Amino acid sequence: MELSWLNWLYTAVAQVITWIHQAYSTVLDPNSGLTWALTIITLTICMRILIFPLFLKQMRSSRKMQELAPKVQELRKRYKNDKQRMNQEVMALYQGAGANPLGGCLPVVAQFPIFISMFTVLRAIAADQPKFGMTQELVDSAKHALILGAPLPATFFEAAQLSEKIIIGFFVAISSLTTFLTVRQSVTRSMAQMPDNPMAQQQKILMYISPLFAFFSLNFPLGLILYWVTTNLWTLGQQHWFYSRHPMPQFDAKGNAVPIEAKPGLFAKLRKTTPEEQAPPPPPEPKIVRQQPSRQSRSKRTGSKKS
């Protein structure tokens, strides 16, 4: 189903696909599945780079909420018999600290229009329709491109051969697995930080239900499934990078956050360090200058005066 008011976005996505495909076609066969797979992967990476500031905003908001966890727990105990007052106090605390509980939705909301646009463009290719600024030559190239033997615009139920269904089903399984790992990575950190959170059980249920949604992609073109797998892998790496640089905050007896040293990154682990680099030499001790008493003349020693 096309949304006419999003035609400008469909055209923009189709144009970017055309540019990326033309760039790869200078060194690869323009009709090969490898060229089209690299085109979709590159499009996904470019899109994720564009929304990277939203990811940082989401993670910083989440970190602020973690730092406020002890105060939130205190408010929940104080107003456990007044749910409305408790929610008001918690939201006031979040607003005062600049934390947004809905900040985690920003990257998902930003990705959704691109996802719809990819779906619409690939469906147009499958229907052999040169729409949204695409040429017939480009449509024919994508329509007949094979990724591990399965057509790029084919869905699981539209695949003509069993081998094609197996390939598409394999990518759907990878999509389901990476979706689970992505949600698990986030939920596990959240539950470790707030084990008594009343939403913890719902988050745990969501963690195991989320992979089932990936099986809806059996109705999606193979190219769109490849897009989803790529964005899941990007999210896994991106979250791992952020979590390693920003460990979960620890708190003292008063509930104040205690600064924690970040774990070394991948490049720091791979870089070989010498013992001198691992343990810097102690600063040099200051030189002690001894004051030598000046030698007095004989007349001063004996107390005599010169005449």
Image: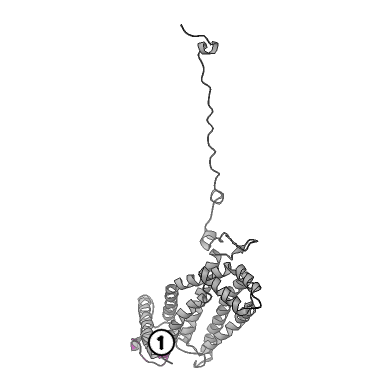
Q: Secondary structure at mark 1?
A: helix
Instruction: Give the image location of residue 152, x and y in percent.
Output: 45, 86
The percent coordinates of residue 207 (x first, y second) are 60, 79
Q: Quadrant of residue 63?
A: bottom right
Residue occupying the point 54% across, 10% down: 302
Question: Which residue is depicted at the point 40% across and 86% down?
Answer: 142
- Is 126 in the magenta? yes
Q: Is residue 193 visible?
A: yes
Foreground of the two, 184 or 33: 184
Residue at (64% x, 77% y) in the render:
198
Tell me if I can see residue 140 in this picture: no
Placement of 283 over or under 63, stated as above or below: above
Type of residue at label 1? Val
276 and 69: which one is in front? 69
- Looking at this view, is 68 or 124 the one in front? 68
Q: In which quadrant is the N terminus drawn?
A: bottom left
Magenta residues (range): 120-135
| Residue 225 screen position, x and y as percent | 49, 83
Task: Provide residue 247's location: percent of width, then percent of height.
Answer: 57, 64
Q: Is residue 69 magenta?
A: no
Q: Residue at x 63, y 62 (%)?
A: 254
Q: Please tell me how many numbered marks the rendered image carries.
A: 1
Label 1 sits on residue: 121
Number of residues whose C-alpha sits closer than 10 Å to that of mark 1, classed few (under 14), some (14–19) or many (20 or more): many
